[in-house]
Image (cartoon, rainbow, N blue to C red):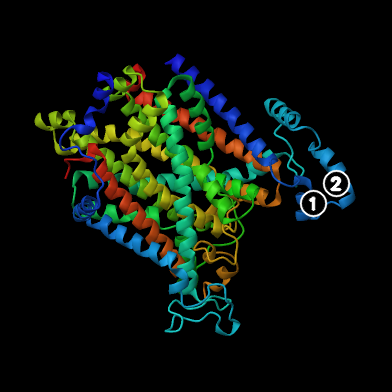
Amino acid sequence: MAGYLIRRLLLSLVTLWIVSFMVFSLLRIVPGDTVTALIADTGLVPKENIDAVRADLGLDKPFIQQYATWMGNLLRGDFGESFVRRQSTMVDIKEALPVTVEIAVVSILLSLFIGMPLGIVAALRRNGMVDHFTRVFGSLGIAVPDFFIGTIVIICMGKYLHYLPPLGFKAVWEDPLTNAAQMWIPCTLIALRLSAVTMRMTRSVMVEVLTQDFVRTARAKGLHPMVVSVRHATRNAVLPVITVVASQFGALLGGALVMETLFSLPGLGQSTLTSIQRRDYAQVQMNALFVATIIVVLNIIVDLAYAALDPRVRVR
Amino acid sequence: MAINETVALPRSVPGMQVRGTLPRSIAACTKFARKNPLSGAAAVFLIFITVVALAAPLIAPYNPLDIAPADRLQAPSWAHPMGTDNLGRDMLSRIIYGGRISLAVGFWSVVLGTCTGAVIGIVSGYYGGVVDIVIQRIVDAMQSFPGLLMALALVSVLGASTMNVIIAISLVVAPLDSRVIRSATLQVRGMDYIAAARSVGVSDSRIMFRHVLPNVAAPFIIIAAVTFGGAILIEASLSFLGLGTPPPAPSWGGMLNGAGRQYLEKMPTLALFPGLAISFTVLALNLLGDGLRETLDPRLKGRD
C-alpha cells in the first residue's frame, strides 16, 4: 500500500511537471509578441517603453531561462506576478476560489441527491416508469447545452416572473441570503446537468452488479430485497460512480465558465477567461497549473478510495 | 508456406465471408433500426440535417449574412418562418447555414481527434511498458485541464476561427478517446490470435493495424458518435463565450451570444431556435451512440 502510494505520488509529480511545461510553452509559441498585444489591448503603457516592459516581465530572456526562472520561483513558493494587475497571481486565485468551491460543492451534492437514487431505482425496476423517465432525462441532460438552458431560464424569470438574481457578488460569510439568491439558479442548473451523467452511470453499473452471483446468493438465502439492493448491490455500484463524480468535481473546480458568465459570478473560470482576454499569461499559466494540481490530487484521492473500499484493488 | 496459411485461415472459414456488400448493410441497418427505434429515428434525423446542411445554398430562402434593417426583430411569419434577428437577417437561413459549421466541426474533430486518439491508444496499449507509461503521463497531463478551458486557451492562442476551433477540440478529445481505445486494446492484446500472429513473425505495426484495429472498431464507432456530439457542444460553448467561429458567420452557439443577447428578452425565439438546433443534433448523436453501444458491446448482449 505504501509502495503503491509512493509510486502514485511520483507519477503525479511527473504529470504536473509535464503540465507546467505544456502550459508555459503553449503560451509562448504565440505568433506575435505578448507585450505588444498587452500594450495594444490595455493601453496602459506608452509605446516607447515596450523594451523596458519586456525586460521587466522577463520576456526578453531565452525561453528555457524563462521557464527555469518560473519553475525555480514556484518551488520556492513564489507564484509569480500577474502581467496586468502587477500583484501575486495567487491574489486572483484566492479571490475566485471561494466562489468556485461553493458552486462545485453545492452542485455536486445536489446532483448526487438527484442522480444516485434515480439511477438505483431505474436499475432495480427496469423498464418501469422511473427507468423511462431517467432515460429521457439522462439523454436530454447531456444534449441540451447549459448556456441555452441558462439563457432560457434568465429570460423566463425576468419576463414572466419578474425575478432576477441580485447583482454584485456577495460571499456566504458576508451576506448569506444574497449569496443564496445568486447561487441557487446556476447551481441547480449545473446539478441537473451533472445528475444526468451520474444517473446514467449509476443505472448501468447497478444493472451490471445486479446480475452478479453474490446478489443472486444474497437473494437466495432469503435476505430482504431492500437489504440486498442497499447493502450488496449499491455498495458495489458506488465505486465507478465515485470516479465520474470526482472528474465532474475537478472540471467544476476549473470554473463553471458558462454559468459564471451568464450569472456574473467571479469564479476561477471568469478569472481565467479574463486573463486570457487580457493576455495576462502569468495569470493564465498559474490558474491552469493550480487547477491541474487540484485534479491530479483528486485523482490520487479517488485511487486511494478505491483501494480502501475494494480489497481486490489492493492486491494488484 | 504452411505457416502463413494458418494465419490466413479464419478468412476462408465458411460463413465468415467478407461482409459489407450493399444489400447486407441495408439489411443490417433495418435490423438495427427495428431493435433500437429511437436510435433509428436519430439516424434518420442526422441524415436529414446533413443533407440540409450540404444543400444549404439551394434550400435557404435568404443569404444568412444579408442585413435588412427594415425587417429587424420580426416574429416568425410566412416570409421568415423563424423570424429575423436584430440586424434583420433571416433566422431560418442562419440556422440552416449554422448546421454546416456545427457538422463540419463535429466531423473534423472526429477525423482529427478521435483518430489520433485511437492511434495513440492502440500504440500505448499494444506496446505497454515504458512506451505506455510515457504516453499515459502526457495523456494524464492533457486531461488535467477541464476540456472547455483548454479549448478556450488553445483558441485564444491560435486565434478564433473555425479551423482553429477544430484543432483545439481535437486536442481536447484525443486524450479522452485514446483512453477508451487503450483499454479496449489491452483486452485484445491478450487474445490468442495476437499471440499466434506474433509467433509467426508478423510485424508489430501490421498486428496493430490488421489485428488490433478491427477488434477495437466497436468502441471506436461508439466514441466517434459521442465525440461528434461533444465537439458540437464545445464549439457552441466557445462561440457563446465569443471565442469560437467569429461573427458574422452563422454559428448556432454564436447566435445565443453577443449583440443578440440583449434582444433575447424582446424576441425569445432568437435563442430558442439555435438552442433547439444544438440540442436536437447532440441528442440524436447521443441516442445513436447508445444504440450502437447496445448493438456492438458484447457485454450488453443478452440483456433485456
Local packing at callout 1 (Cα closer than 10 Å; few below 14, some 14-19, many 20+) is some
Q: Residue at x 56, y 53 (%)?
A: B163
Name the residue at 56% across, 65% down: B249
Q: Nearer the viewer, residue A244 or B224?
A: B224
Residue A5: x, y in percent?
A: 47, 19
**At which x and y percent is residue A210?**
20, 36
Distance of mark 1 from mark 2, alpha carbons? 8 Å
In the rendered image, the vertical position of residue B41 relative to residue A12, given as above or below = below
Answer with left or right where residue B197 lies relative to residue B268.
left
Of mark 1 and mark 2, the one earlier in the sequence is 1
| Rendering coords of residue A141 (x, y %) | 37, 54
Instruction: Return the residue found at the far right.
Output: A48
- B47, above or below B267, in the image: above
Name the chain letter of the residue that bears numbered label 1.
A
Q: Give the amino acid type for the residue marked by disc 2 in the picture.
A: Ile
Q: Position of residue B166 (x, y in %)?
A: 53, 50
**For numbered disc 1, what is the local secondary structure?**
helix
Q: Amino acid at mark 1?
A: Ile
- What residue is shown with label 1? A39
Residue B195 placement, left or right of B58: left
The outermost residue toward the front is B1
Screen quadrant of the C terminus of chain B: top left
Find residue A50 and name its label.
Answer: 2
* Closer to us: A266 or B188: B188
